[in-house]
Amino acid sequence: MNPEHSSSSDRKLEQRLLHLLLAARDTHDFSARAELNALLRENADARSTMSRLMVDEQALISRLRDDSIVALLEPVPASESKPRTTPRWAAFRPLTTAAAGLVFGLLSASMVFGFVGRSLEKMVSLLQESFESGPAPLVTGMPQKLDQWSGDFSELVGEQQGVKPKDGRRMVRLLRSDFEGKPSTKPTRQGDLMRVIDVRPFLREANGGEVVTTLSALFNTATLSETEQYDGAVTLWALGPRFPTEENLMEDALAHSVGMCRPLDRDPATWQSVSTRLLLPPRTEMVLLKVSFSPKPDSGESLSQAPTHVSFAGHFVDDVRASVSIRKPVSNRRNQALP
């Protein structure tokens, strides 16, 4: 391959990743986040480039902090202004210099409070579930044990209704929005698949720093009629020491976050990615992962007219992933050189 063409392709990929990252992080653009997840999931070059970009970003911020350039973010009286000199980070490799304007854009409130004074130590995978091994999820509602799938009526299936598993030969098909033994006192329209994970080791390791959990999943449906519309959602719940029930989840949860795709498309050949992130509060001991389908209500339908549960004709979930990012507090490194 022509080196110039390769370099041009690399720059375009870097620019695309930076654009999606800015949109997802600063404007909470769900479509940008889904596109970024899909790109990183399917493109090895994109994963390598993103890893390098994040390292560059951290190195740049560290150097900015070392040079007191972060002070430029604060208003400075005219009498205290000084002649501008070329900062040392301009000697960084071309990518960092070219992206400097974008990185300064990232030094918004979210970036200053999220990174300045802290260091992204590492990312740990909690779960990469393609349902190729292990037992089928329980259909008994909210999980009451760690590391066990449970929820509403579902089954493990292979290719069917024009839908192929995204990864491997198996996927989960959600069947209904209720579970064995569920009281029928009120209608339920959302079909859930859930798992509880112990995160205490990560909060201990953070030692007062930040632990951020990320959850993503792929959704697909068989061919739908024009009148049918369904949402796909992933939800993270930060919990204390008690396993939740449907009744106490909202009351007991320390925090939660939701990512949604509204609505899912009607193409069984395409999988749609949905993700969300949650900064865990200090007292968190467990995290509940939830993957859900729900239909759009029919026009004019009231709760009293709604059925006690919804049946799903062809709704599938695959490639569920969860991870934690651990950011430990760091001392002032103003006088330390970059490694």
Image (cartoon, rainbow, N blue to C red):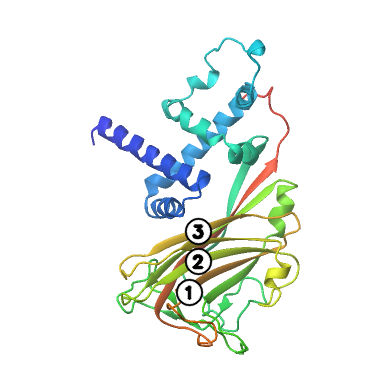
Of all residues, the one furthest to the left in this rendering is 2
**Above/below status of 282 relative to 78:** below
Label placed on residue 233: 2
Callout 2 secondary element:
strand
Q: Is residue 165 visible?
A: yes
Residue at image coords 51%, 39%? 54
Residue 165 relative to residue 239: left or right: left
In front of the other: 89 or 205: 89
Determine crowd level at label 2: few under 14, some 14-19, many 20+ residues with C-alpha closer than 10 A.
Answer: many
Which of discs 2 and 3 lies nearer the camera? The answer is 2
Quadrant containing the N terminus is top left
**Above/below status of 248 relative to 185:** above
Residue type, numbered disc 1:
Ser
Residue 88 relative to residue 249: left or right: left
Residue beneath disc 1:
294
Residue at image coords 71%, 57%? 201
Label placed on residue 158: none
- The spot of residue 295 in percent (x, y) is 45, 75
Q: CA distance from mark 2 to mark 1?
A: 8 Å
Residue at image coords 75%, 47%? 208
- The spot of residue 13 in percent (x, y) is 36, 40
Residue 89 relative to residue 14: left or right: right
In front of the other: 302 or 264: 302
Q: CA distance from mark 2 to mark 3?
A: 8 Å
Q: Quadrant of residue 264?
A: bottom left
Residue type, numbered disc 3:
Ser
Residue type, numbered disc 2:
Ala
Residue beneath disc 3:
275
Is mark 2 in CB contact (under 8 Å) with mark 1? Answer: yes
